[in-house]
Amino acid sequence: MVEFSEPVSATGGCLCGAIRFALHGPLPAVGMCHCSKCRRVSGAASNAILNVRAERFEWLAGETHWREFRTPSNWGSFFCPTCGSPTPHRLSDGKRVLVPAGTLDEDPGPRVLGHIFVGSKASWDLIGDDAPQFDETPEAPK
Ligand SMILES: [Zn+2]
Ligand SMILES: [Zn+2]
């Protein structure tokens, strides 16, 4: 059993409840990705993600229930095979977990950190906050 040094700050899960998780300690702000792949996997204007440290993420149920789909370019989509909800997944370096913000049970308070791939957002996508916007990512060479 993993020991968590900080209390649970949020819980979440998929639509059917097969997948449940908890986040410990301070929550990061939400990153919004407006790229065409994120639009497809979310079915929405953008994919809202919390990038959390792996030691702050705890599976409560369904740790082996989720499935993944990879495109030929190795871009991954992670989802519950029962209900189709997007699910958290650990990045390949093992140090961070990407958590779909919309799967949190309640609004735990984080705000939007920024918007990426705004250069390819849908024409009907009107960004309504004043968080920074990037055509691609902040690191991408122009
Ligand atoms: Zn589910
Ligand atoms: Zn994206």
Image (spheres, rainbow, N blue to C red):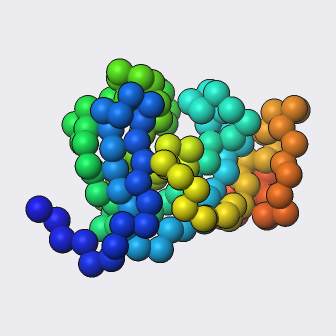
**Quadrant showing the N terminus:** bottom left
* In this picture, residue 36 sits left or right of residue 87: right
Say which residue appears at 18% left-offset and 71% top-offset. Answer: 3
Picture layout, residue 62 above or below residue 94: above
Say which residue appears at 56% left-offset and 44% top-offset. Answer: 102
Residue lying furthest top: 82
Residue 52 vs residue 116, the one in the foreground: 52
State the image coordinates of residue 45 (x, y, percent, origin top left): 73, 36
* In this picture, residue 3 sits left or right of residue 90: left
Say which residue appears at 83% left-offset and 37% top-offset. Answer: 125
Q: Is residue 103 visible?
A: yes
Q: How many marks?
A: 0
Say which residue appears at 35% left-offset and 56% top-offset. Answer: 22
Residue lying furthest bottom: 5
* In this picture, residue 58 sits left or right of residue 138: left
State the image coordinates of residue 48 (x, y, percent, origin top left): 61, 48
**Quadrant showing the C terminus:** bottom right
State the image coordinates of residue 18 (x, y, percent, origin top left): 30, 32
State the image coordinates of residue 26 (x, y, percent, origin top left): 47, 74
Q: Is residue 96 visible?
A: no
Residue 15 vs residue 142, the one in the foreground: 15
Residue 33 vs residue 107, the one in the foreground: 107
* In this picture, residue 125 sits left or right of residue 84: right
Quadrant for residue 44, please give it: top right
Quadrant for residue 69, please give it: top left
Residue lying furthest left: 1
